[in-house]
Amino acid sequence: MKREQQRKLRELKKALPKMLKEKVKAYKMKKKDYMIWYSINDLFIECMIDVRETVDDRCCCSIQVKIKPLWIDDLLWDCLGMENNKAEPMSLRAIGAFTVSGVEVYSDYAYLKEWTREEMEKYVDLYLEKFNQIMNEVIIDDFYAHISDNTYHEELRVSLTMTYNARYQEAIEYLKDKGEGIFCNKGLWIHDSIKQYCKRMMNKQQV
């Protein structure tokens, strides 16, 4: 990448957060750090708009929109003994380390030919309008339809969904050969904690 391109990219990266902060005010969206988010009908919808260089030294502006039900993080925190997170600001579900990655329902990108703020702003406006459209149209069925599209956090999404729907034995069987999982709190790995949670719930059903 040429020095002039590096300078332009730095300026774009610096301008983007301020640009988004101002523009989301026209919608009902919320913004925290690098994430834009919105919650409706027990769904959490998050959007990341980014500007970056590509492997072939071009400049790219992109959007990625993910959705998840609110209960999935609540259940994760219950299993990990982190129930206090439920009282934290809603934005924690977008930027928190101990959260479940939602399913992608939309993504797009565009190359900036001139690497200018004006050019980037054109795509930011398009992307925010698209996110606004998704916010008003998305339903929980969209989460279930894409639950296994991406392997990242797939095991969490699937096992927690089984657990939420009281399919406890099925969740235990599903996790049998899935290792420890990616989260650990106070020595307890997430897959073990989900299985323990399921066993407790099954015992309650038998009482």
Image: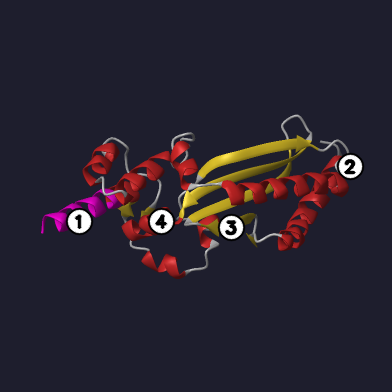
CA neighbours of label 4 inside 10 A, class few (<14), some (14 to 19), many (20+): some
Residue 80 in the image, given as x and y percentages of width and height: 34, 58
Q: CB atoms at circles 2 and 3 under 8 Å apart?
A: no
Q: Does the magenta stretch include residue 196?
A: yes
Q: Which residue is drawn at 47% across and 39% down?
A: 152
- In what quadrant of the picture does the N terminus appear? top right
Residue carrying label 4: 71
Residue 198 in the image, given as x and y percentages of width and height: 24, 51
Per the rendered image, the range of residues in magenta is 193-207
Q: Which of marks 2 and 1 is nearer the N terminus?
A: 2
For the image, the number of numbered tags is 4
Mark 1 to mark 3 CA distance (whole Å) = 33 Å
Q: Earlier in the sequence, mark 1 or mark 4?
A: 4
Badge 2 element? helix
Q: In which quarter of the image is residue 187?
A: bottom left
Mark 1 to mark 4 CA distance (whole Å) = 19 Å
Closer to the camera, 53 or 202?
202
Residue carrying label 3: 38
Q: Which amino acid does label 3 sit on?
A: Tyr
Q: Which amino acid does label 1 sit on?
A: Arg
Q: Which of marks 1 and 3 is nearer the N terminus?
A: 3
Residue carrying label 1: 200
Badge 4 element? helix
